[in-house]
Amino acid sequence: MFVKKSFLRIFLSLTLIAMGALAIYSAQAANNQPITVLNIKGAITPAYSDYLHRGLREAKKNNSQLVLVELDTPGGVLTTTREMAQEIMASDIPVAVFVTPAGAHAASAGTFLLYAAHIAAMSPGTNTGAATPISMMPGNEPAKETKEKDGDKNAKDEHKKNDGTNEERLAGKAIEDTAAFIRSLAELRKRNAEWAEQAVTEADSLIAKEALEKGVINYVAADRFDLLKQIHGHEVEIAEGQSVTLDVTGAPIVVYAPDWRTKLLAILTDPNIAYFLLIIGINGLILEFYNPGTMVAGVIGSVCLVLALMSMHVLPINVTGLIMVVLGLIFLAAEAFMPSFGIMGIGGLIAFVIGSMLLFDAEAMAGIGLDASSIVIASMFSAALIGAGIYLLFKLRKLQNSTGVEAMMNAHATVKIWNGRDGKVELFGETWNARADRILPVNTGDRIKIIGKDNLTLLIDEYDDKTDNKAAE
């Protein structure tokens, strides 16, 4: 009986110890859910959309309790921004967007990402806003035109009635659509919708302290660790009726930095890089057509053209601009073969410049775009490259043929056997039958001139230094 009671006590003690250890382990495991950190620094392009997608997937694989996106961007492609905002809103892991370090900004497209995040934070010395889509046409100021002034409730109606250009109407629609998008984000995250609309329609901007006071962001933190300290224990709503409480004290931090793939895509999807790849690709193919067989220009041009088309597949491209760029280069090249007193050359250059200005949809690429200096450099490069190709082409045409029957004409052969009007001669290391229309006073070893060819017999004439020199002159 005593043995049974002792055994029971030992069994219960071990069971309680095991349950306590399991509870402690579970608590530690919950607390040890990692925090995945992503770094977005630069223009918002499809490269960073791919990076965010892979980062969220990695966070889910690691069972992360929070994804912290450290952001510093001047803006970017609006369509890509929408995709990234959708990724953040659809995430079942809380996403915090943190504009850091001091001196960083979340301008234009960055403002939308800040509003889309479950948690929005900024470091002192940072700013956000200026989210107005940039019109590609000079002189358009749709934000000012659509804004009601001096209490005039009919200002918008009057603007709609006036005879604005088609570009102005399209810009106005883009403004309204973008403003509605950021208002929907503000409503979802319960943040300041009024200022969000001002950021789009009036390009308004705020520093960190002002953003906190106006309810644009949730926290102002000096650095990553200060932010984690502030959000610890706070409840975050992931979806309607679904929320999580953050337990980030002592949680491991996993930095998922941009890899070579993201960096390469970021380079290729830069509008200026994509533009130069397109120019080099087209010029390379044109030079290959000028002088077939060199292969170098064709291979380089083909590779650059494929990379350019890949970049433009994900960038907002104006098809009209692309066609004008290609036509402009073709006209510049055609000027060499169909002289038009400069009409095709000048027209091609004008088409090239205008096409370059229209190539990228500037309203969909707020904050980034094609630099004017890139257009000037590309125009000079194309003109110089095509000019060099034309020069080499005409230089090659002036060279004497080195193969075939054409190479034999007026060439000098050496007599091996001669019987007055026929015999054998040596030309280019080969022995040929030869004949003349008259008796030639030549001997073995003398030089004679080839003037024609009849099947396998060469027609020759006497070689005269003075006559040949005058003909050459």
Image (cartoon, helix red, strand yellow):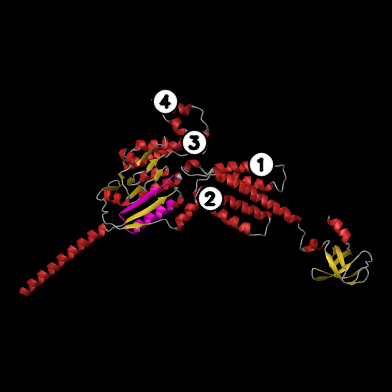
Image mark for residue 274: 2
Query: Which residue corresponds to mark 1?
Result: 346
The residue where tag 3 is placed is: 170
Dividing the picture into quadrants, the one containing residue 191 is: top left
Indicate the secondary structure of the residue bearing disc 3: helix
Q: Are marks 3 and 2 in contact (CB under 8 Å)?
A: no
Residue at 59% x, 47% y: name it.
Answer: 378
Across and down, in percent, residue 463 comes to: 88, 63
The label nearer to you, 2 versus 4, is 2
Q: How far apart, in angstroms, are the residues tagged by discs 2 and 1? A: 25 Å
**Residue 376 relative to residue 433: left or right:** left
Query: In x, y percent, where is residue 112?
Result: 39, 43
Viewer-proximal residue among 25 and 229: 229
Looking at the rendering, the stretch of residues picked out in magenta corresponds to 48-75
Disc with the residue nearer the chain's start (3 vs 4): 4
The residue lying furthest to the left in this view is 1
Q: Are marks 3 and 4 in contact (CB under 8 Å)?
A: no
Residue bearing mark 4: 154
The amino acid type, in three-letter code, at marker 1 is Ile
Relative placement, left or right, of 31 versus 8 is right
Identity, as a three-letter code, of the amino acid under mark 4: Asn
- Cα distance in 3D space between marks 3 and 2: 26 Å
The crowding category of the residue bearing disc 1, from other C-alpha atoms within 10 Å (few below 14, some 14 to 19, many at least 20), is: some
Which mark sits nearer the N-terminus, 2 or 1?
2
x and y percentages locating residue 328 in the rendered image: 63, 45
- Please check the rendered image and state whether residue 107 is part of the magenta-colored stretch, yes or no: no
Question: Badge 3: few (under 14), some or many (20 or more) residues near its Cα, within 10 Å?
Answer: some
Question: In the rendered structure, which amino acid carries the disc numbered 3?
Answer: Leu
